[in-house]
Amino acid sequence: MKKWLLILTFTICAFTTVRAQYDVHFTHYWRMLNFYNPAGAGAEQRMFAYAAYSNQLSGFENNPKSMLLNIDAPIPFVRGDHNLGAGALNDDIGMFTNQHIFLNYAYGFKLFGGRLAAGAQLGILNSTFDRKKIIFGGDSNDPAFPSGTADGNSIDFGAGLLYQHRHFYAGISGLHLNAPTILLGETNETEVAPYFNFTAGGNIMLKNTLMSIQPSLQVMTDFVAWRADITARGTYEYDGKQYFGGVTYSPGVSMTLFLGLEIMNITASYGYELFTSGIGAENGSHDIFLGYQINLDIFKKEKNKHNSIRILQ
């Protein structure tokens, strides 16, 4: 596996300009609309904070590891459906560390019995290349590589639309729309290609009112490569707790199993992705999701019941 990573890295670094895929795929994409679509900010209509961790291709040396922190909420004290979100992604893969810090804004309004939101994203992309992590087989002074640690950053833009109904939702977004270029030293640069994301899902109630099924779909593409995820998730509610589990199939890529629990506004879930391309079941990806949400009606004026002093007189 070490040879595989070296070949991949050497191929990337051998070119002056590189088109990079900054966007991480998380198993729990269906719970992370506000990461893949700026219009997802405020989709829960309450404050929603979560952390997601992905350990990909486990068992391989220098395998990718990604950590995301995200929070969004409706804007208090402001009339209308205005929402803000913020997130930070750290992605380690081999000799590269990529970071994405972003702010989302979404405005929603009622439409056809549901809610349509339009969102925009402003962010900063940062890349760091660490030469010390290269294992040279010969000349360690190859000019194709930066002489030491090299880093750079660039402004990033995104936009999206999200429609939510009582029984379904659907959204489309474009990220890195300005195709940002990150300079790494004097002779290397990373070009981040724009990519588009389509997501949809629904809620199917069963005869047993305690159980329901939530199918969902996500398609990611930069019009060169693409990935589709088709998910069937089942939910069971009992005694104030919600248990869920399901399976995701990604054609030509993987099969993912996940289990989770929601209690007291806290959601915890674990997923394991088994690749179908011959990598091996033991070298899959581990995903962990932890979320917390709370209503923000504490900022709203409440009606206080009291007796009128004038009437009592």
Image (cartoon, grey):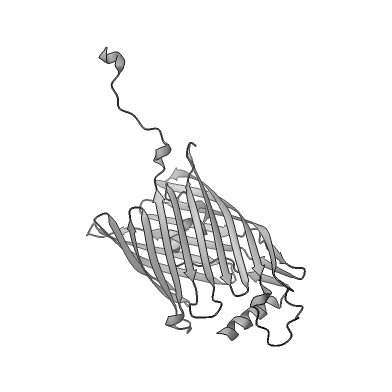
Q: Give the residue drawn at x 64%, y 78%.
A: 9
Percent coordinates x, y for residue 285 in the rendering: 46, 74
Evaluate whether residue 236 shows in this view.
yes
- For this orientation, the residue located farthest to the top is 313
- Locate the C terminus by quadrant: top left
Evaluate whether residue 251 shows in this view.
no
Percent coordinates x, y for residue 45 in the rendering: 42, 47
Percent coordinates x, y for residue 219 in the rendering: 49, 66
Q: Give the residue drawn at x 55%, y 61%.
A: 89
The image quarter containing residue 160 is bottom right
Q: Is residue 138 left or right of residue 51?
A: right
Observer-nearest of 137 and 11: 137
The image quarter containing residue 93 is bottom right
Establish if 36 lies above or below 82: below
Percent coordinates x, y for residue 184 in the rendering: 71, 67
Image mark count = 0
- Locate the N terminus by quadrant: bottom right
- For this orientation, the residue located farthest to the bottom is 138
Q: Is residue 190 left or right of residue 211?
A: right
Establish if 236 lies above or below 96: above
Establish if 270 lies above or below 295: below
